Image: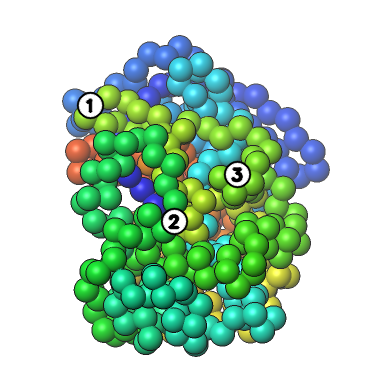
């Protein structure tokens, strides 16, 4: 999920460290709120040296523009958490490893897992049409509902239009930023819209699919799907720092997420953009989210070999490096860094206004890398900074493998 807008930021430095066992935590304290040099003005090329230490890489990207960044790395020999920058620019509160971030569409991986668990328990049939589970007042307003199955929703092959692509939806979010969105209201923006393609004829990522899955799961369960996610996924995995925003209380502080909107830096921390929906409502930390993708890669409970096979069956091409299954992405790294190129990871990825989260698990090497940050740059109007952050993420991953 996302809104359309964008931001600026602040700087940080200094290193502190503490840890237990082989897990170490590093953090940089923010300095003053002085603005960093604008890459847009200087066209400066920021290069990230993978031979420098991890904390210096984070401090460098924050000094170049990110508000804050939180990273977790785990290899067979060691694990560590690193943070740099701020959780809140107004108070200049430093980011720490326990701060929560919106993980946006990573939520889909949890919803897909729950759906497969319920199918294994006989509660839902993945190959039944969605007419079986949805009320008539919804199915009557959507195309091909007698042909679309639960599995098509999971795999984004339904042909249903993405409600986030409808301009009127964004007009209302801008006109009424404090709107507390209900799922059915969000869904209504694609009512009576034609199918984008024939069912199961191709892949097209649509958040509408997971809005519908959330409605289905709540109804089949007879209670909030967040409870089932907690009981069947979070608790078995020991994920104590992950929550479903607006469906349950948060156990820690949610950081502010920033973007520029009409030239003004805006925090989206308090925006209620349907975060109870199933297409992107959860919050977590880098370390906690890594537990999920690691368990998937290792086929650890609650995952079974059968569920993992179904989630990875008949992968659809997203782009040159990513393939989509059922709520899971398999990424094959294409990189100028020899240490990274060719490596294969399980992941998903998420973007909410002001928040980006990436968590990768590389099964061949048993390596987890999670990168969260709370400043999003527009790929069109802030192209140089957007690319700079992508370069940072790539360099970070390459450094991990170069040092194995």
Using the numbered discs, state the Cα–Cα distance from disc 1 to disc 3 in whole angstroms.
Answer: 29 Å
The residue that mark 2 highlights is 183
> Which residue is drawn at the image coordinates 51% and 77% (left, top)?
133
Q: Residues within 10 Å of mark 1 (few under 14, many from 20)?
A: few
Q: Is residue 43 above or below residue 37?
A: below
Lower position in the chain sequence, tag 2 or tag 1: 2
Q: Which mark is residue 55?
A: none
Which quadrant would residue 237 be assigned to in this image? bottom right
Q: Is residue 202 above or below residue 3?
A: below
- Residue 2 position, x and y percent, is 36, 48
Q: Residues within 10 Å of mark 3 (few under 14, many from 20)?
A: many
Of labels 2 and 3, the one closer to you: 2
Which quadrant would residue 146 be assigned to in this image? bottom left
Q: Are marks 2 and 3 in contact (CB under 8 Å)?
A: no
Is 157 situated left or right of 277 in this image? left
The residue that mark 3 highlights is 285
Lower position in the chain sequence, tag 2 or tag 3: 2
Residue 275 in view, yes or no: yes
> Which residue is drawn at the image coordinates 58% and 65% (left, top)?
218
Lower position in the chain sequence, tag 1 or tag 3: 1
Using the numbered discs, state the Cα–Cα distance from disc 2 to disc 3 in whole angstroms.
Answer: 25 Å
Q: Secondary structure at mark 1?
A: loop
The residue that mark 1 highlights is 263
Q: Secondary structure at mark 3?
A: loop
Q: Residues within 10 Å of mark 2 (few under 14, many from 20)?
A: some
């Amino acid at each position: 999920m996302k809104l359309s807008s964008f931001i600026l930021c602040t700087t940080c430095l200094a290193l502190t460290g503490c840890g237990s066992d082989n897990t170490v935590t590093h953090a940089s304290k923010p300095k003053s709120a002085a603005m960093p040099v604008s890459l847009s003005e200087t066209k400066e090329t920021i290069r990230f040296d993978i031979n420098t230490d991890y904390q210096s890489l984070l401090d460098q990207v924050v000094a170049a523009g990110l508000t804050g960044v939180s990273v977790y790395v785990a290899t067979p020999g060691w694990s560590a958490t690193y943070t740099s920058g701020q959780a809140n620019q107004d108070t200049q509160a430093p980011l720490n490893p326990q701060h929560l971030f919106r993980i946006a569409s990573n939520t889909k991986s949890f919803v897909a897992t729950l759906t497969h668990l319920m199918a294994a328990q006989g509660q839902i049939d993945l190959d039944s049409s969605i007419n079986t589970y949805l009320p008539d007042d919804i199915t009557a307003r959507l195309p091909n509902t007698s042909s679309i199955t639960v599995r098509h929703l999971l795999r984004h092959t339904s042909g249903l239009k993405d409600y986030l692509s409808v301009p009127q939806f964004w007009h209302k979010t801008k006109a009424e930023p404090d709107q507390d969105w209900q799922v059915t209201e969000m869904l209504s923006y694609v009512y009576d819209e034609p199918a984008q393609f024939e069912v199961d004829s191709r892949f097209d990522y649509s958040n509408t699919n997971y809005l519908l899955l959330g409605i289905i799961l709540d109804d089949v369960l007879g209670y909030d799907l967040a409870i089932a996610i907690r009981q069947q996924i979070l608790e078995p995995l020991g994920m104590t720092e992950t929550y479903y925003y607006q469906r349950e209380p948060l156990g820690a502080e949610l950081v502010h997420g920033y973007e520029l909107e009409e030239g003004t830096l805006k925090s989206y921390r308090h925006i209620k953009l349907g975060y109870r929906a199933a297409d992107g409502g959860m919050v977590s930390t880098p370390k906690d989210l890594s537990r999920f993708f690691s368990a998937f890669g290792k086929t650890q409970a609650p995952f079974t070999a059968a569920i993992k096979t179904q989630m990875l069956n008949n992968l659809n091409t997203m782009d040159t490096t990513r393939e989509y299954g059922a709520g899971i992405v398999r990424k094959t790294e294409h990189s100028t860094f020899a240490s990274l190129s060719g490596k294969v990871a399980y992941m998903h990825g998420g973007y909410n206004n002001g928040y980006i989260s990436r968590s990768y698990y590389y099964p061949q090497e048993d390596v987890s890398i999670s990168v969260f940050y709370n400043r999003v740059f527009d790929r069109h109007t802030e192209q140089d900074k957007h690319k700079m952050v992508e370069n940072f993420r790539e360099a970070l991953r390459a450094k991990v493998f170069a040092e194995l």
